[in-house]
Amino acid sequence: MTQTSADLGLSAAAEARLAEYLVQVRAALTGVPDVSPDEVEADIREHVENELRTAIRPVALFVLEAVLKRLGPPTQWLPAGRAAPPAEVPSLLGYLRHRARGVVGALWRGPEDWRLPYLSFAVFALGVVAFPLFPLFLIVSYFLSRAGIAVAKEKQIPIDAGRKWLLYPPVVIVGLVLLLGLTLLAPLGVTIAVCGNAVDADQQERWELAGQSGLAPRFRDNTALMKRYPAVVTTLDRLLIRFPGNRTTKEVGGALFVGAGAFAAWGAVIGLLGARFPGSVRAVFDPLCGPFEGRGAGRVGLTCLLLLAVWCGFAVRILVDAGLV
Amino acid sequence: MDADFLANWTTQMRKGLLELCVLAALKARRMYGYDIVKHLSAIDGLVMGEGTIYPILSRFKKDGLVETTLAESSEGPARKYYQLTPRGRQLLGKMLAAWAEVRDGIEAVTTEPLL
């Protein structure tokens, strides 16, 4: 709830004036046991924030003065029948507490806000210099950046351009790697595995259909066995019969077809998962994905599901044509 | 002398009445602290300084007359809303009854013709 004066967008003079006013508030309320100075200070900050909501930033001193004037002198805030405390510092303990709060406030408002951003950037830069260790440094700086962003959000400190330059590089890189990994890695891996296995199985089948026994010899050129036994027709030959062009074009077409199916299936899975758990997506990609909502992911998932259905239709047709169904 | 006395008397009277008005403002619904201030400041001659209301709210909270709840706000951080506790509501009823009695008494006294 409590905000620092830095959050209010005050000019330096106005910030100093507000700090002085709040000291007066605390002084006035010291010795009034049934009033919580912390709570009143928080309320006053909220009040000032509300009053300055539409003010031009940075807020000039005279604008703040008008607000403080309407609030009135804190010495008048004592309950009816209560006398104002003496002007001098009321007690050593009160004075020490006041000073301690000042130090904490100064630390938050001051350069300490920048500690995590600078630390994150330093680790990131160190990773660039010590390149072989870059992934390790990147991961450390990524977590520091996420911590810095979380602290800024918690303290309601706007992430301005300076902080973005310090905090975002590791977040952007890790976010992109995660995004590419999540969206591309699985379908690409499946496509490569399926195509590789299909070629191996095709060579073995061709070898056996040609009346040879044992394992087929490995050739650098996949078409070597085809050229040696042109009369042999394998399952893969029958599957590729619907694809246009020569053998190479047919194989590329077949690989693209398998890839399309894998991407459609994976897109449907991650799209529907994203729609079901938008909070998890936001947590992983914060702050890059902004106000991510499940609807968009749901649309992607359903579209991919539709494409997968169409793909299945074509796949069945290919299997029927190949005599496999 | 008269001016000082009047200023002091007015201040004390307003302070006393302001406490009643703060509780009365919360009679029908819970309110955001800032809205209470703006609501009461709109009444001529009641609020001398807008800040006066916050210590009253803090004291009422400590005394268990009001309680606070945080509610999300589309305009920024969560807002602290004040609402009457059953004890606060009970006290408000008694204060309003006392005020009506005093007001009627004062009315009777002040409307008597000056000799």
Image (tube, coloured by chain):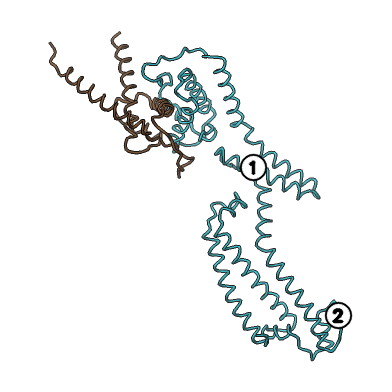
Indicate the position of residue B45 as horizontal and vertical percent values.
29, 25
Front one among A94 and B94? B94
Answer with mark 1 or mark 2, whichever residue precedes in sequence.
1
Q: Secondary structure at mark 2?
A: loop
* Quarter of the image where one finds residue B39: top left
| Residue at 76 percent of width and 46 percent of height | A127
Specify the quadrant that holds the N terminus of chain B. Answer: top left
For disc 1, the neighbor class at 10 Å (few under 14, some 14 to 19, many from 20) is some
User: Mark on residue A215?
Assistant: 2
Q: Amino acid at mark 2?
A: Leu
User: Mark on residue A7?
Assistant: none
The hue of chain B in the figure is brown
State left or right for residue A72 relative to residue A292: left
1 and 2 marks on the same chain: yes
- Label 2 resides on the chain identified as A
Mark 1 to mark 2 CA distance (whole Å)? 57 Å
Q: Secondary structure at mark 1?
A: helix
Q: Amino acid at mark 1?
A: Ala
Q: In the figure, the cyan chain has which letter?
A: A
Image: A135 above or below A250:
above
* Residue position for label 1: A147
State left or right for residue A249 relative to residue A296: right
Front one among A263 and A82? A82
- Label 1 resides on the chain identified as A
Indicate the position of residue A259 as horizontal and vertical percent values.
67, 72
Image: A301 above or below A49:
below
Residue farthest to the bottom, as pictured: A231
